[in-house]
Image (cartoon, helix red, strand yellow):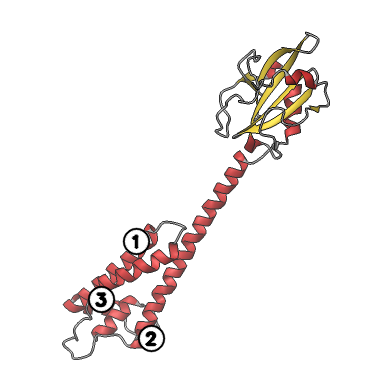
Amino acid sequence: MNCDIARQTLEFPGSDHVPAVSTREAEVHVQGCAECQQAVGRQRHLDQRISQVCQDVPIPLGLKERLLARLANAEAAATGPAPLPAATGVANLPSPSLAGERHATRRMWLVERWRSLTAVCLAGLAVGLWWWTKTTLPQMTLDTAIQAALAAPPEQMGAFERFRSGVALTLPTTMVTDALTEPPGQLPDVEIAVYRFRIRDTSGRWVNGRLLAIPRVALSDPPQATRFLTGPAQASRLPYRTTAWAEGPLVYVCYVEGTEETLFKLKPQTA
């Protein structure tokens, strides 16, 4: 059997361009031909390298370019010089058409492998995006958060541990916080930490107030103000005066049962 036919039969079994010889006949020829054994060994090593390249290249940035570059290097290293003619005098070099088909077949295999890896990567990205959306994207409006905190009695608030979004709890720097009377509580299943305080109104009467701290990512409409009482206080549906602002990753809401003048007592005095 011709060496070239034996190698092509093992590399492209069932191809229309290869003479109808059985795989077993080709294997028997290769077992008795040292040159064919070396050629088949180099080809199998190249196929293994191609598979490793497809598995090792990072996904997804620059995937296609890196795969093609490493494939070219692997082919150059593994193929080496062309095999010598066989003892029968028939050239071992494949015909140009068969060489072109061989490269086209490998290219198609590589493209299919790249598409499969890309599909897996995109599926993982979709799952990650769904989970990130579920856990960190805005889930409530500022008004909803305020009304929930106004209606919650202290006994329903659990001890504050941490925000599920990972934001660290800190006190605001643009309002006086000496009036805070207790450690913060947390509303059940809501990303809100609640401080309670008491302060005297303009007539000297004690009034109750609360300071809310909410991760900015938990709100669909965080306030534009960046300091306590930057704008006028708002009147809520209950007899409270409310102001909201953002400092870093936290949104703060301060409200009292009194008037806007009572809120101003919590504003730091400038020299």
- Quarter occupied by residue 45: bottom left
Mark 3 Cα shell of 10 Å, populated few (<14), some (14-19), many (≥20): some
| Element type where label 3 sits in the image | helix
Q: CA distance from mark 3 to mark 1?
A: 26 Å
Question: Is residue 57 in sight in this rendering?
Answer: yes
Tag 3–tag 1 contact (CB < 8 Å): no
Q: Nearer the viewer, residue 124 or 168?
A: 168
Q: CA distance from mark 1 to mark 2?
A: 29 Å
| Element type where label 1 sits in the image | helix
Task: Give above or below for 198 relative to 28.
Answer: above
Q: Which mark is residue 17?
A: 2
- Quarter occupied by residue 144: top right
**Residue identifier under label 3:** 27
Tag 3: amino acid: Glu
Mark 2 Cα shell of 10 Å, populated few (<14), some (14-19), many (≥20): few
1 vs 2, front mark? 1
Horizontal side of residue 80 vs 144, given as left or right: left
Mark 1 Cα shell of 10 Å, populated few (<14), some (14-19), many (≥20): few
Image quarter (top left, top right, bottom left or bottom right) of the N terminus: bottom left
Residue extending farthest front = 271
Tag 1: amino acid: Gln
Residue 79: image location, x then y, percent: 26, 74
3 vs 1, front mark? 1
Residue 164: image location, x then y, percent: 57, 32
Residue at position x 36%, y 78% from top?
A: 12
Tag 2: amino acid: His
| Element type where label 2 sits in the image | loop
Residue at position x 61%, y 44% from top?
A: 133
Question: Is residue 155 in sight in this rendering?
Answer: no
Q: Nearer the viewer, residue 12 or 250?
A: 250
**Residue identifier under label 1:** 52
